[in-house]
Image: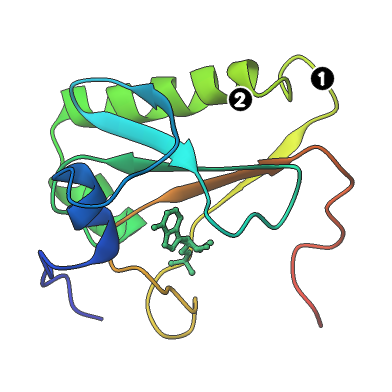
Amino acid sequence: MTHSYDPQNIFARILRGEIPNKTVLETPHTLAFHDINPAAPVHVLVVPKGPYVTFDHFAAKASAEEIVDFHRTSAKVCEMMGVVPGEGYRAITNAGKHGMQEVPHYHLHILGGKVLGPLIQR
Ligand code: AMP
């Protein structure tokens, strides 16, 4: 799986302000916004502002400051969306072909607001 970053991907364009988004929270290193096609009552995407393709790419190459900011922002989003404290949530990330990743910029999906069902179909 490649980590070569496509600067024309849709989240890069959102981060450059070329495409609008419904922002939930923004920090110097991280942007959280509502998914355009929500799969649950709560469906927020958290993206690092740096050019990282996948979770493993981000974990390997981002600075400690970026990594801490990303996770603290994700936790704050859970509180803002009322799933913490609350009835819980699922945080998932897709990577590459087998993960069926659509947008090649690392993002965490935060889903909640209903019982989400099993993790994957067997
Ligand atoms: P993934 O399959 O993990 O790459 O997920 C990509 C997600 O991005 C999907 O849930 C899409 O609905 C969402 N998405 C695509 N374009 C936009 C956009 N312009 N604004 C917000 N969410 C988007």
Q: Nearer the viewer, residue 51 or 55?
A: 51
Please say if 84 is above or below 9: above
Q: Nearer the viewer, residue 26 or 119?
A: 26
Picture coordinates of residue 117 (x, y %)? 87, 59
Residue shown at 83%/53% (left/top)? Answer: 116
| Among the 4 quarters of the image, the one containing residue 17 | top left
Mark 2 surroundings within 10 Å by alpha-carbon count, few (fewer than 14), some (14 through 19), many (20 or more): many
| Quadrant of the frame with the N terminus | bottom left
Q: Is mark 1 within 8 Å of ligand 1?
A: no
Q: Would you say 114 lies left or right of 76 here?
A: right
Residue type at mark 2 is Cys
| Quadrant of the frame with the C terminus | bottom right
Residue shown at 64%/54% (left/top)? Answer: 38
Label 1 belongs to which residue? 86
Give the colour scheme of this rendering.
rainbow
Residue shown at 85%/27% (left/top)? Answer: 87
Which SS class for mark 1?
A: loop
